[in-house]
Amino acid sequence: AQKVTQAQTEISVVEKEDVTLDCVYETRDTTYYLFWYKQPPSGELVFLIRRNSFDEQNEISGRYSWNFQKSTSSFNFTITASQVVDSAVYFCALSEAGAAGNKLTFGGGTRVLVKP
Amino acid sequence: GAVVSQHPSRVICKSGTSVKIECRSLDFQATTMFWYRQFPKKSLMLMATSNEGSKATYEQGVEKDKFLINHASLTLSTLTVTSAHPEDSSFYICSARTSAIPNNEQFFGPGTRLTVL
């Protein structure tokens, strides 16, 4: 069974600080996909990144960066120089390639509050 | 591309009534659609998976007679909350995927906020 754990329920930072969101996953599949989504107060999920299990390269996109480490089953997300607009709930999710219907399992989410 | 819409975005109804929520893939054919429910300050929980033309597969603990799902075409799935009660008040989100796009990616609708009085 697949499982995603986001240990941090809420993080509060001051603008321009960096913030790292932890994500630990469990799966028995060797082929799987990891995702990060942002959910602003409006409620709509915003896709941030997808990573497959065979690609351990870290990725940077603007102020966002991701650190994927299979050895520790972690897929952490860092926001550099945070801004007020980054305030949202962030979800890490996992989908196993072999799962019936390719279901997504979400972590509990981390609420990020960036104060001016 | 890969846009998913939901209608309505917000609905308020009286206890005992039924509410239908539509999920449409606007620019692609969705082989599979998913329905999620999200309670305030909680995560998304998968309710059911539906494939076009076949019966939906419900997650454990989700009442299929209460949450009726119809996936009649490759671009439309509907969720009907029958005899709604206040405890059904929640944020309902649909997503869709197509076999044409690999990597298990799902495209999410904007959600429907249901309030049952």
Image (cartoon, coloured by chain):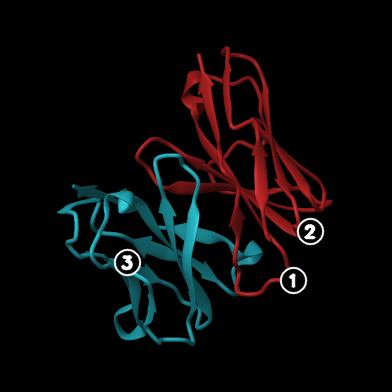
- Mark closest to the chain's N terminus, 2 or 1: 2
Asked whether disc 2 touches disc 1, contact meaning CB atoms under 8 Å apart, the reply is yes
- At a point 79% along the width and 58% down the height, the residue shown is B29
Question: Which image quarter is the N terminus of chain B in?
Answer: bottom right
Label 1: which secondary element:
loop
| Residue type pointed to by label 2 | Gln
Q: Nearer the viewer, residue B60 or A29?
A: A29
Q: Dot 3, crowdedness within 10 Å: few (<14), some or many (≥20)? A: many
Which label was assigned to residue A52? none
> Badge 2 sits on which subunit?
B
Q: Dot 1, crowdedness within 10 Å: few (<14), some or many (≥20)? A: few
Vertical side of B41 occupied by A58: above or below: below
Left or right of A57: which side holds B76? right
Asked whether disc 3 touches disc 2, contact meaning CB atoms under 8 Å apart, the reply is no
Q: Position of residue B88 (x, y in %)?
A: 52, 27
Vertical side of A21 occupied by A67: above or below: below
Give the letter of the red chain: B
Is residue A1 at all visible to an observer of this figure? no
Q: Position of residue A98 (x, y in %)?
A: 60, 74
| Residue type pointed to by label 3 | Cys
User: Image quarter for residue B78?
Assistant: top right
Give the letter of the cyan chain: A
* Residue that carries the numbered disc 1 in the rendered image: B100
> Badge 3 sits on which subunit?
A
Left or right of A100: which side holds A40? left
Is residue B55 at all visible to an observer of this figure? yes
| Residue type pointed to by label 1 | Ala
Q: Position of residue B18 (x, y in %)?
A: 67, 21
* Residue that carries the numbered disc 2 in the rendered image: B29
Label 2: which secondary element:
loop
